[in-house]
Image (spheres, rainbow, N blue to C red):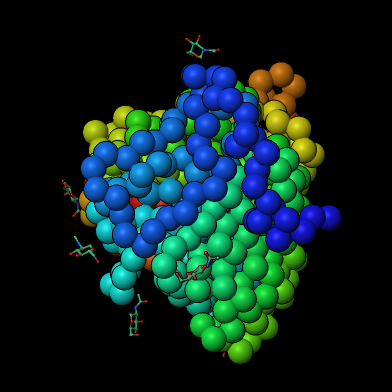
Amino acid sequence: MFSPSIYLLSLPSVLGLALADQACPRIPGIQVYATTPNEGPSEGRFTSCENGFDSPKVLAGNASSYDWWYFDAIGTDGVSSLAVAYFVEANKSGFTVTENFTNRDFVQISGTFPNGTSFSDFLFADNNAIVSAMGDGSSGLWNGTGASWAGSPDLSEYLITLDAGHLGYKGTFSMHSVAPPHYPCSPKRANETMEVLLGVGWANSIPDADVTVQMTIHGSTLSFIGTGYHDKNWGVIPFTDAVGAWYWGHARMGPYSLVWLDSLTPSADEHASGYVAYQGQILHAECNKMKVRPTGSNVHFPPQGNDSLPEGFTIEVDLGGELGLLKAELASNLATLAKPGYGRWIGTVNGTVGGLDYEGVAGYEMFNFF
Ligand SMILES: *[C@@H]1O[C@H](CO)[C@@H](O)[C@H](O)[C@H]1NC(C)=O
Ligand SMILES: *[C@@H]1O[C@H](CO)[C@@H](O)[C@H](O)[C@H]1NC(C)=O
Ligand SMILES: *[C@@H]1O[C@H](CO)[C@@H](O)[C@H](O)[C@H]1NC(C)=O
Ligand SMILES: *[C@@H]1O[C@H](CO)[C@@H](O)[C@H](O)[C@H]1NC(C)=O
Ligand SMILES: *[C@@H]1O[C@H](CO)[C@@H](O)[C@H](O)[C@H]1NC(C)=O
Ligand SMILES: *[C@@H]1O[C@H](CO)[C@@H](O)[C@H](O)[C@H]1NC(C)=O
Ligand SMILES: *[C@@H]1O[C@H](CO)[C@@H](O)[C@H](O)[C@H]1NC(C)=O
Ligand SMILES: *[C@@H]1O[C@H](CO)[C@@H](O)[C@H](O)[C@H]1NC(C)=O
């Protein structure tokens, strides 16, 4: 067990150490983000260090930079869900964030009740947001929203707390990791690229987790157990300058944990990151081997501007050895968000590995800026 307040309030001891490794200069253990962006250039980190996996990756964030921490949970019923994302992201980052945008420190909460009814809200921080890093973990507090998270230094346990009854959200969401972390092209280790494609950082601290959600949301109870996921993304140039399209998601399929982020640059160069773990052991954490493709009518690969939203996706990756080709299909139970060029779904996965059939639940997303 761990106490959230300890990680949030204790100063990381590493602050006192000399900046011995010039190749990996430390980002200060605590970042305080004002609600307005800095002027001028900001600095993004895109090569991994020994630790600091889930730490802030952008210094002096400006109007086009973004740094966010994302958490989700999907119920075993394949419908109940909760996603909480903590953003430091101003309005030139390339996302059309919200019509009610007031400042760059905000929390987006969305999800679905077991009957399929969805909810979504933005909570904007007062004055500042704070993230502290310890070991590989992080903790954060978006001032005035009542929304925070606390992570253990070894990335094994995270607790998300929403103490915002006045805004309609009260409760907790805890995650226990069941799959080791990875970067876009490798397991967690130093001196690896953290760019999923040029200009976009990605660090997937919890590819798969057992989760418990106990929330009261606008007066209704949302309580479930299921699977969860945590990652972060960041960049210093607008997301839409770097990305033409992307298919992202995660699934638990039998004993396998799957994560994919198959992306295209605006000129349609494909960069795919794939991850497969079996009972907590990484089988595959590499670039450009896994293939994710949309299915349905009037969809294309590469996507086109007037494509329909996909009905599902197919996933293929060669695991080599005795297992050989892993094939999986995603089918949606419901779209939690669907608008031109953007889709987000909760659904099922089924597939084969080593000649055996498996199934499970999945959460996935698509951007199409073409
Ligand atoms: C923010 O900083 C990055 C990196 O220096 C730079 O490329 C970008 O143009 C800056 N954005 C703004 C709005 O100044
Ligand atoms: C971004 O937000 C700032 C401050 O709220 C505002 O002055 C500016 O007009 C906004 N810019 C855009 C492109 O929306
Ligand atoms: C923006 O605020 C208005 C008024 O409070 C509200 O009706 C609307 O749903 C909000 N839009 C979003 C995207 O949150
Ligand atoms: C939140 O902002 C208020 C007003 O600036 C400040 O007094 C308070 O210390 C902040 N809380 C944290 C945890 O920083
Ligand atoms: C880091 O990786 C780069 C390129 O992959 C390599 O040239 C360099 O020697 C590595 N540095 C260390 C300290 O391992
Ligand atoms: C679905 O469940 C929510 C939460 O319990 C409730 O507020 C809503 O009215 C329900 N919707 C339907 C269509 O039954
Ligand atoms: C979609 O757009 C492409 C080019 O942008 C065009 O060639 C094609 O005919 C369009 N398809 C439909 C169904 O409108
Ligand atoms: C998924 O299930 C469908 C329906 O049973 C089946 O047709 C399909 O072959 C399965 N896909 C994979 C990859 O096993």
Residue 303, located in which quarter of the rendered image? top left
* Residue at image coords 43%, 55%: 33
Count all numbered tags in the image, as a single digit: 0
| Residue 91 horizontal side relative to residue 210, left or right | left
Image location (x, y in percent) of residue 199: 35, 35
Closer to us: 262 or 33? 33
Image location (x, y in percent) of residue 168: 55, 83
**Which image quarter is the N terminus in?**
bottom right
* Residue at image coords 77%, 38%: 280
Image location (x, y in percent) of residue 73: 64, 61
Image location (x, y in percent) of residue 318: 60, 26
Single out the residue that lies furthest toward the right.
Answer: 1
Above or below: residue 210 compared with residue 185: below
Can the viewer see residue 213?
A: yes
* Residue at image coords 31%, 74%: 100
Residue 324, located in which quarter of the rendered image? top right
Above or below: residue 206 compared with residue 78: above
Above or below: residue 127 compared with residue 14: below
* Residue at image coords 44%, 37%: 201
Can the viewer see residue 291?
A: no
